[in-house]
Each structure stands twice: as C-alpha cells, then as structure tokens.
Amino acid sequence: MADRQPASASRKTFAPWSDPSAEPFIVFDNVTKRFGDFVAVNNVSLNVYEREFFSLLGPSGCGKTTLLRMLAGFETPTEGRILLDGQDISTIPPYRRPVNMMFQSYALFPHMSVADNIAFGLKQDKMPKPEIEERVADMLRLVKLEQFAGRKPHQLSGGQRQRVALARSLAKRPKVLLLDEPLGALDKKLREETQFELMDIQENLGLTFMIVTHDQEEAMTVSDRIAVMDHGVFVQVATPAEMYEYPNSRYVADFIGDINIIKGTIKSTANGAVTLETEDAGTLVVHQAMDAIPGTPAYIAIRPEKMQVISGVSQNQIDGEVWDIAYLGDLSIYHVKLPSGAIVKASQTNVTRLIERPITWEDDISLTFAPDAAVVLLD
Amino acid sequence: MNRGPTWFNVASVTAGFAFLYLPIVILVVYSFNESRLVTVWAGFSTKWYVALFQNQGLLDAAWVTVRVAFVSATVATVLGTMAAIVLIRAGRFPGRTLFSGMIYAPLVMPEVITGLSLLLLFVAMNFARGFWTVLIAHITFSMCFVAVVVQSRLVTFDRSVEEAALDLGCPPLKTFFQITLPMILPAVISGWMLAFTLSLDDLVIASFTTGPGATTLPMKIYSQVRLGVTPEINAVCTILIGIVTTGVVAASLITKRQEMERQRAERLAVAEA
C-alpha cells in the first residue's frame, strides 16, 4: 500500500498477554502431536489474543507447521485440546472451522480464474451472487489485482500469485488467518514490501494472524509476539524486543540476530549484579538480578552493536587484536581475536567516511560493554 | 561436429520405419485393390468398402466391439481412478501390499490365463456367456492400466490445493469433483482412451469369455482370415487404423497447443512483473 499509515497508536499499547483479565482467543492446552514414534509437538500450551500478529519461528522440523496445521484442522492433536474463541475445535473438520490458511505453495486452483479462486470459499457458504461479486471486487482492490481478475494462475508472476492466495484466504473474513511461510518464495525486496502490507491488512481488518516462518527478520518485523520453537517445544514466547534484548537461552540468543557468547563461571551475585570469571575475557560484570551458586557455569551474551571500541575503562574491558573487518557501508563489523583465540564481534556505525580507517587489521584494541547491555544465561 | 546424417543413419532409420510401417502401408494399399486376390494389384477400386457396409456380420461385430469398448472403458476408468486414489492417498492400511499387487497382477498376467480363469468362473457360476461376460472381462483387465496412468499423475499432485479447498469450506467429496478431478482430468482421459483401445483390439480374452451373438470385430476378422484373407478385411483394418490415427494425432495436437499457450502466457506474466 503506497499511502501507508504509520502503525496506529493502539499498536503501541497493545499487550493483552500481560493483562491477566484478557480472554485468550486461541488456546493450545497441553497439545501433543506424534507421528508414529516421532514427537512433532511436545506438550505445548499457548494463548494467542484477538487481533494479535503471532509468529511461530524455528528451523525446519521444529513442529511449527504441525502446530499451524492442527489449528487449521489438517492434523488432529494426539493429546490436548485446541480452543478457538472458547470452543473446543480439536475434532471439527477443516471445512467447518472459521479459520483460513494461506499456503506456502499458494495452492491456487489452476483451472479457475483469479476471481473464481477468490470466490471459491464464498460460494461454499452459499453467499448470494451479488454479494460474492462485491466481496471479490473488494479483495482484488485490497491486493491491487483488479485488472487480473480474468487471468488463470499460470498467467501471473510469483508475486501476483502470492497476492491472489492472500486475497482468497481473506475473502471469507476468517476469525484467524494462518500463514505458512507466506513470503518464502518471493525475492528479498518484494518480501520486505509485502511484510509491511501484511501488517497493514492485519491492522485494518482487525484480524488475528498466525504466521509460520524460519526467517527471524521477518518474524521481528511483523509480529506482536514470537514463539521460538525447537524440537516440538517453545523455547521462548515474547515480543520481538524482549526476545532480542533478553533471550532466555543460548538457542534463542543465537537464533535471533547476531550475538557474542562468552563462556564463564559465576563468581558472585549481589545487589543486582553478576560477576563472572571467563577464560576468554577475564572478569566481567553484568547488571542482572540472579540467584546462582558461585561456580555455576554460565554464558554472557552480548550483541555486537553494544560493544564499544574504547580503552581505559575499569570494568568489562576485553583486549584483543583486529582479525577481520566486514565493511557493510552503514556499519563495519570488527572480528576481534582475544588472547585465548576466541573471536568476538563488535559493530560500529560508520559516522564518518572511512577514507583512512581509524581501526585497521592487526590493531590492538580494547572493547567494552555496559554492564546492563549484556545478559547472563545459564542454559 | 554438425555434418548432417551419415549414410548409416539414413539407412537404419529407413529400415526401422519400413519394418514398422510397411506392412500397414501394404494393407491399406491393397484395401483399394480391384482384384479379389490379396497379392495381385489390379487397379484402384473402393468396391471392398461398399461390400464391407453390406456385410451384416462384420457390421454387427463392429457394433458389439464399440459398445463393449465404450462401456468397459468408462467403468474401468471409474474403478481404476478410485483404485489409484486409494493407493496414493490412503497411506499404509493393512493389506495395502496385497491390494496393490492385485491391482497390478492383470498387467503381467498372460491373457490366455486371464481369459481361461474368467471362462471357468463364468461356467462355475452358470453365467450365460455373451455381451455381459465380455464386458466384465474387459473391465477387469483394463482397469489396472487406468490405475497406473492415474496413479502416475496423482504422485505429483500438490495436496495443498485440496487442503486449500477444504480450508475454504468445501467438504471432501465436493473437493474431489470440483478440484481434484478437473486437475487430473487429462490423465483420466488418457486412461479411458487406453482402456478403449485395449478393449477394441482384444482377441484372446474376448474369445474365451464370449458366447452366441456377441462376436467382437477382432474375433470376426480372425475367423474370416482363417478361411482366406479378403480385401474386405483390409478395408475394415484401414478404417480402424484411420480412426486410431485421427484420435492420436488430434490428442497430441491439442496437448501441444495447450502447452504452447501455457508457455506463452507464462512468458507474458513474467515480462509484465
């Protein structure tokens, strides 16, 4: 949408998950799905709220698609219940659920025109013909395909097919729209544009979206909350910002964005600060309320952009040698080799033109980070 | 290295095609022979075609054959398509291996054995042999060919298209007729045409299972040839060849035109994007 409005003010305060009185719209209640001996989804519980844009993020085979397909009705849970708007839908067949899905392969009906594809779901509901025509026209306008109504799917480009699939899945005004890797087949630029369009559509129509993706940037861009999955369980369910700043495990820290992980042992915890002894970088302090016995192995996770190239500080100073520089234009990422041989990354915004590099290969430099910029992870 | 065909290429292709098609060409040419003798050319004539349409026996046999072929191909297509769907879609049900083995057995079973066993069955059941027994026999053996053709299409079928229809509120049976069947229709039609052709030219199984009043064209031709080949037989065969050739050429032209149309549309779509 060219005349995009900035995300409305309601978005800023939208956080029903932190309101204990809010009624969840979709509830996964101890859901397990087994295929023979393989456990695809392992005792998962989750609340999703109305008008939420929720992402299931994880590598392939982590169970995210199975979870989505259970909500659509293509798989039945082996154990547990799925509630939609208070009603148990676990045993309702897919063609009677008020849920629609946009498929990864788009799954357009090849023998039908674009308009007939969009009208298909409405015809199943025996909607009167003039209303169907009106709705189809609305949908075509929404995805800007008015002049393609008569085309067959094979007469469209990949991006146009993706729009038809979206229009078709939205035509019935489902309570929940499920999107299975909806942008996976688009090139990077088109994918980024479409992400914002999806957010606008979700916002304007007031729908609940649940999207499956393996692309963490996509999840970060579009979601209100993200669930990171691995081996059939949720590792962390949080907002994009929480997940980026306070990952609860090395798995999440590593999956979302770039991060340095430094191994160490806890020396002391007191007054909201944790002191760790590390082999790679000496003694480091992180501001974090934590209860742990001294000697417990732990990890410090620090984002490269929170590393500063500076010397002469008393705390959290890490000395090393510039090993490699990745110049990305807007910023440079310095790979710094520590005396132990470990590499940490620090990114610096290039605020001046790099005609003469202030820092270059094989320079001895010192890095530091603020004690509240890092997190300590036990797992 | 592009120096055109060598004499060896030309000779081998000529010999190959001659071996395949010369007998048919001779058969067609002699159907227009003036002479009664099959081996002596005595000038052009269409009198054997005229005689053919006055030969009630041959015409009756042709009518029986067409009816058997049409009905058996249709029933075999329905059953074969259902079998293919079960084999591809039903997953691993108990007895699946046995079921698929039994579907494919008639493909490799010698026709004599199929014919004989059906004959014994009909005799044991005291079933009057004739049109219906030939029909049942033809359905039995052509069904498996349809199943093979339809199955090969279903293997590459994107199931999410069906799931999309279910998801949009279309019940399973309606989904089959509105989505699946139109998409696999070319394979189903090929299966039907294959079954039709198989039934049309079957001699062995029909001979075993037929009875009075249900002589098929291949049986009639065979019995007449044993008394001596007449140009009338050549004429019948020429007509059959003509029908089959027209069908095959038309089908391939239609497929080719559709394919070209599709490719052109795809190029256009990509160019516009």
Image (cartoon, coloured by chain):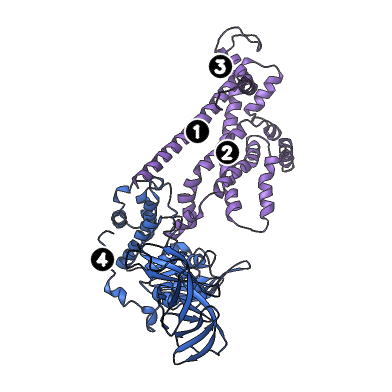
Chain colours: A blue, B purple
Q: Read off the chain for label 1.
A: B
- As measured in the structure, the alpha-carbon distance from the residue carrying label 1 to the one carrying label 4 is 55 Å
Badge 3, how many Cα within 10 Å: few under 14, some, many 20+? many
Residue at 66 percent of width and 11 percent of height: B39
Q: Position of residue A87 (x, y in %)?
A: 44, 74
Q: Position of residue A300 (x, y in %)?
A: 49, 79
Badge 1, how many Cα within 10 Å: few under 14, some, many 20+? few
Q: Secondary structure at mark 3?
A: helix
Q: Is residue B88 above or below residue A93?
A: above
Residue A199 as seen in the image, left or right of residue A292: left
Residue A5 as seen in the image, left or right of residue A125: left
Given contact means CB atoms under 8 Å apart, are the residues at marks 2 and 1 in contact? Answer: no
* Residue named by callout 2: B73
Are discs 2 and 1 located on one and the same chain? yes
Q: Quadrant of residue B21?
A: top right
* Residue named by callout 1: B251
Q: Read off the chain for label 2.
A: B
